[in-house]
Image (spheres, helix red, strand yellow):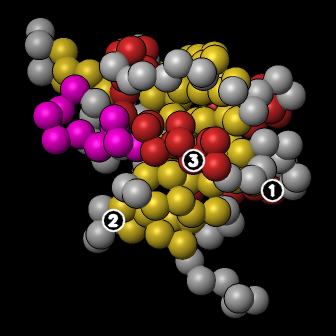
C-alpha cells in the first residue's frame, strides 16, 4: 500500500527550543514517529510543505494543501495530512468542497500535545490514521483519539479537548 503523508506543522510537530524556551514548528517530526512503528508493507512518501501553527495558516497555505492533495491522490492509495488542530476543520471543509469525489481516503490528523511531550497523543493519532487508511472507503475524514469522523461537519470541541461532528439539519 502506498500512502502519502503531507505535513503542515501544527502542535503535533512543535519542538522545544532550549535556548529561548519557545515551542515552535521548526521541521517535521514525522520520521521519528514512523521509524518507531513496524510498517513492513507500507510505502510512505512524506511531503513537508508548511511548518506553521495552524492559527498562522493563510488561504494560500490552504490552497497549497488542496493542490498537493489533488496531485498526490493520483499516485496514492491514501493521503494523510498532519495539521494543527485549531484550524483543521477549515482546511478539511475546503478540501470537502473542492474534491467532491476523492479517489482514495484523505485523512486529517494532528495532536493536542506536541510529539515531544511525554503525554502526547501524536503517536496514537498517526498510528490510527495509518490503520484507517487501510480500512475506509474513499472520502474525507478526521482521525484522532480513537474516532473516525467524516466531513462535512467535523469541528474541534475545545471543552472536550477532541473532535466531534456537528449534526446537520438534513440528517
Mark 3 or mark 2, earlier in chain: 3
Q: Vertical placement of 124 versus 150: above or below?
A: above
Helix, strand or loop at label 2? It is loop
Which residue of the protein is positioned furthest toward the front in this rendering?
Answer: 40
Whether residue 156 appears in this view of the structure is no
Residue nearest the observer in this picture, 68 or 144:
144
Whether pointer 3 and pointer 1 mark residues with C-beta atoms closer than 8 Å, the reply is no
Measured Cα–Cα span from mark 3 to mark 1: 22 Å
Is 10 on the left-hand or right-hand side of 171? left
Q: Vertical placement of 156 versus 166: above or below?
A: above
Which residue is at 62% across, 42% downward? 133
Which residue is at 53% across, 59% downward? 148
Helix, strand or loop at label 1? It is helix
**Would you call the spot at circle 3 few (<14 residues within 10 Å), some (14-19), or many (20 or more)?**
many
Label 1, on which residue?
97
Whether pointer 3 and pointer 2 mark residues with C-beta atoms closer than 8 Å, the reply is no
Residue 13 in the image: state x and y as whole percent: 37, 27
Residue 29 in the image: state x and y as whole percent: 38, 19
Q: Please, what is the dominant secondary structure of the magenta stretch?
A: loop
Residue 143 in the image: state x and y as whole percent: 51, 52
- Magenta-colored stretch includes residue 58: no
Q: Which residues are magenta?
A: 116-125
Helix, strand or loop at label 3? It is helix
Which residue is at 42% across, 22% downward? 38
Which residue is at 71% across, 45% downward? 105
Label placed on residue 132: 3
Whether pointer 1 and pointer 2 mark residues with C-beta atoms closer than 8 Å, the reply is no
Tell us which disc is closer to us: 3 or 2: 3
Label placed on residue 158: 2
Amino acid at each position: 500500500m502506498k500512502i502519502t503523508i503531507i505535513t503542515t506543522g501544527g502542535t503535533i510537530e512543535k519542538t522545544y527550543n532550549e535556548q529561548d524556551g519557545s515551542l515552535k514548528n521548526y521541521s517535521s517530526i514525522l520520521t521519528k514517529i514512523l521509524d518507531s512503528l513496524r510498517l513492513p508493507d507500507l510505502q510512505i512518501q512524506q511531503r513537508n510543505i508548511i511548518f506553521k501553527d495552524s492559527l498562522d495558516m493563510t488561504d494560500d497555505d490552504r490552497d497549497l494543501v488542496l493542490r498537493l492533495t489533488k496531485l498526490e491522490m493520483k499516485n496514492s492509495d491514501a493521503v494523510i495530512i498532519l495539521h494543527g488542530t485549531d484550524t483543521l476543520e477549515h482546511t478539511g471543509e475546503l478540501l470537502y468542497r473542492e474534491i467532491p469525489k476523492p479517489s482514495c481516503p484523505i485523512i486529517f490528523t494532528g495532536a493536542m500535545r506536541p510529539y515531544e511531550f511525554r503525554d502526547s497523543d501524536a503517536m496514537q493519532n498517526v498510528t490510527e490514521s495509518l490503520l484507517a487508511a487501510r480500512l475506509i472507503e474513499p472520502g474525507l475524514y478526521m482521525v484522532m483519539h480513537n474516532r473516525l469522523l467524516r466531513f462535512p461537519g467535523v469541528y474541534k470541541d475545545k471543552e472536550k479537548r477532541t473532535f466531534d461532528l456537528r449534526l446537520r439539519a438534513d440528517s
